[in-house]
Structure formats: structure tokens, C-alpha cells
Image (tube, rainbow, N blue to C red):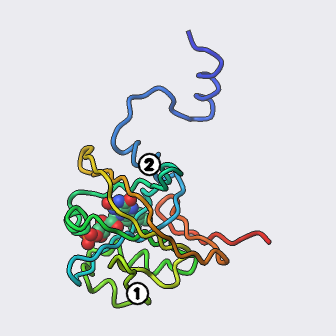
Amino acid sequence: MINRRTQSARSTGVITDQAISSDMFKQSMRLLAGGVCILATNSEGDWCGLTMTAVCSLTLDPPSLVACVNQSTGTHRMMTRTKRVSINVLSNDQTDMAELFSSNAVRGQERFEKGKWIEMASGVPALVDALAVLDCEVLQQTSVGEHSVFFCGVKSAMLQPDRGALVHFNRKFFSVHPSH
Ligand SMILES: Cc1cc2nc3c(=O)[nH]c(=O)nc-3n(C[C@H](O)[C@H](O)[C@H](O)COP(=O)(O)O)c2cc1C
């Protein structure tokens, strides 16, 4: 028997009850719009960083966030050792930085040659004109499939909230402008 909900889902072409394939999962997650960050770390003067959308707030007390990083990345290897990272929240005019820090052609220290980067007191790299830079310490990490989930305590922050955000949606970058 087909109930009314299933019927209406079928008539709009929405698939509601199929086991999820990896393609369908990827397509679904592409429709989850996400703010874009660069996670960066420093190991004895060697900087490493990558573009990320899998960053979210965890809890207020202690101030903490979650970052999910693919274990095959160079940044994963370095941050597992250093346990200190910055989360640089990108503004709507920083698409070029997001592309640079996810590029296969440019890696490691070379990615930091563009943009203005400084070192915070903890040693982590900070992108001077990011919307927000959060200085974090890795408290715990756990692995799920090919990713690690890093639980990070936020130690300090630098904010410049007057500009709009950069958002990634359906494989494209979008510039979000404040409405006022
Ligand atoms: C919009 C966007 C979001 C991304 N989000 C993540 C993410 O959340 N976690 C992750 O591990 N990789 C993510 N990536 C992929 C990495 O940025 C990419 O693999 C990068 O080249 C890894 O750099 P590394 O190996 O030099 O550290 C994302 C890429 C893009 C373009």
C-alpha cells in the first residue's frame, strides 16, 4: 500500500526510500551549503593548511568546535603531531584562497605565498583578513572511515565581522552579502 506521503514524493520525483549509494550521499551533501574555512597548522616553522567546509560549533563550555579532516591529507599528518590549529573563516572575496588551499598543484608551504599570513602567539598561521581566526588546541581525535574527527578547544579569536561570508553549495562558491 502506498501512503499519501510516498505518493506525493513519487509525483515530484523525489526518491525517499532507496538505500543510499555513495553517489547519492555525495549529491546530498553537496546540497548542504557550508561556510568555507582554511584550517592551518605549524610544525617548527613549516606551515600546512587545507580548505574545509566540515567545521562546526560543538559546545560553549568549553568553547569548542569539530573539524573533520581526510587522513590522506598532508595537513592531517601535521596536525596530529602539533595539536594546534587555526580555523580561518573566509570572507566573500576569498574564493581564490579557498581554491588555492584545495589545489592538487600547490601544496604545503607554497600555499601561504598568497594572502597575508602572520603567526599567532601559539605559533599557528593566521590569515590577517579572514572574517574570523580561531586559535585552537586539539583535545581529542577519533577516526571514522577515511576521516578523523578532531575535537578542538578554542583558545582565542580575532574577528572582522563587517564583510559577507563565502559559502560552498553544489560544487560552487557563493558570495553572501549582508542584507543591510
Ligand atoms: C569547498 C571544499 C571543501 C572541502 N572540505 C574539506 C573538509 O572538510 N575536510 C577535508 O579533509 N578536505 C576538504 N576538502 C579537500 C581539501 O581541501 C583538499 O583535499 C586539500 O588539497 C588537502 O590538502 P593537503 O593534502 O595539502 O593537506 C575540501 C575542498 C573544497 C574545495
Q: Quadrant of ligand 1?
A: bottom left
Say whether residue 111 is left or right of residue 72. right
Q: Please name the amino acid that badge 1 sits on.
A: Trp
Of the two numbered discs 1 and 2 in the rendering, the one whose residue sits closer to the viewer? 1
The quadrant of the rendering that contains the N terminus is top right
Closer to the camera, 127 or 136? 136
Residue 86 percent across, percent down from the top left: 39, 71
* Label 2 secondary element: helix
Q: Which mark is residue 27?
A: 2
Q: Is residue 136 above or below residue 3?
A: below
Instruction: Give the residue drawn at x 43%, y 74%.
Output: 98
Look at mark 1 in the image and give the residue it sits on.
117
* Marks 1,2: beta carbons within 8 A: no
Say whether residue 131 is left or right of residue 154. right
Residue 110 percent across, percent down from the top left: 27, 86
Q: Please name the amino acid that badge 2 sits on.
A: Gln
